[in-house]
Image: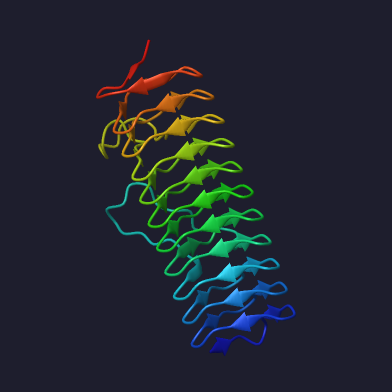
């Protein structure tokens, strides 16, 4: 393992084989770090956190000449609160903040400029893009794609393989990017597709496989392609 001399380690920290912990990292008490984990410069980790094998924490976003929306260059360190569980082969970017008790499944990628509130679950193979806010006690299941510029309020359930979009013009350079806004207690079924800037009302239900092109009123049930509110 490789631990920079400036790293602050709490008590009863377990570090796996071949782990790398870079300059200025702060780690709380009773933290478990898996084998081959890489914790990048400045990352802050609370108490009682579990980190799986082959994890990268605090990665900086990359870019190229073609990319229209360049990622932010000035980002605060990755911040992980107490009792967070992070599976194996996970990549968490700098500029992300995880609140207490968040659970991250294996093979998840979560980008910068994101806040995930307390006790939320992010399922295996999910991808969450930048400039997104996710409330507390949310469940995002396996294989979901959460586009950039999305708001997900408290107690939302999102079934496996849901996909979201934030660009009406598909990289043409027109318009602004706005992801869906999913309000509290809404439920989204398996393989649903949510188009840009739609609002899913509180306690609304989106059926499995629905393609949602318009706002869904609170407590409504919508299904189909295009999705229509069930009367």
Quarter of the image where the C terminus is located: top left
Q: In the figure, 177 relative to 28: above or below?
A: above
- On the question of residue 111 being in view, the answer is yes
- Nearest to the observer: residue 202 or residue 25: 202
The residue located at (34%, 39%) in the rendering is: 190
User: Residue 109, position in %: x, y?
Assistant: 42, 58
Q: Quadrant of residue 177?
A: top left
- On the question of residue 131 being in view, the answer is no
User: Residue 153, position in %: x, y?
Assistant: 56, 35
The residue located at (43%, 61%) in the rendering is: 61
* In this picture, residue 55 sits left or right of residue 9: left
Tally the marks.
0
The colour scheme used to paint the residues is: rainbow
* In this picture, residue 33 sits left or right of residue 192: right
Q: In the figure, 99 relative to 26: above or below?
A: above
User: Residue 27, position in %: x, y?
Assistant: 67, 73
Residue at the extreme top of the image, as rendered: 231
- Nearest to the observer: residue 33 or residue 60: 33
Q: Quadrant of residue 22?
A: bottom right
The residue located at (64%, 53%) in the rendering is: 99
User: Residue 72, position in %: x, y?
Assistant: 48, 54
The residue located at (25%, 37%) in the rendering is: 172
- Nearest to the observer: residue 82 or residue 128: 82
């Amino acid at each position: 393992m490789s631990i920079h001399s400036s790293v602050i380690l709490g008590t009863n920290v377990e570090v796996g084989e071949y782990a790398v912990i870079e300059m200025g990292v702060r780690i709380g008490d009773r933290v478990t770090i898996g084998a081959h984990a890489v914790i990048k410069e400045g990352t802050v980790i609370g108490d009682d956190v579990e980190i799986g094998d082959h994890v990268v924490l605090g990665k900086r976003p990359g870019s190229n000449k073609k990319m229209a929306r360049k990622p932010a260059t000035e980002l605060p360190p990755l911040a992980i609160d107490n009792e967070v569980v992070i599976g194996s082969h996970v990549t968490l970017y700098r500029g992300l903040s995880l609140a207490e008790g968040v659970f991250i499944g294996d093979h998840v990628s979560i980008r910068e400029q994101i806040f995930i509130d307390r006790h939320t679950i992010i399922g295996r193979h999910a991808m969450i893009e930048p400039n997104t806010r996710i409330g507390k006690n949310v469940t995002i299941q396996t294989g979901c794609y959460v586009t950039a510029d999305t708001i997900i309020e408290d107690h939302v359930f999102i079934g496996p393989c849901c996909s979201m979009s934030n660009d009406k013009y598909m990289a043409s350079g027109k318009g602004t990017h706005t992801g869906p806004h999913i309000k509290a207690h809404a439920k989204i079924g398996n393989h649903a597709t949510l188009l840009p800037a739609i609002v899913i009302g509180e306690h609304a239900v989106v059926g499995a496989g629905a393609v949602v092109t318009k706002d869904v009123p609170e407590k409504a049930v919508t299904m189909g392609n295009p999705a229509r509110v069930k009367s």
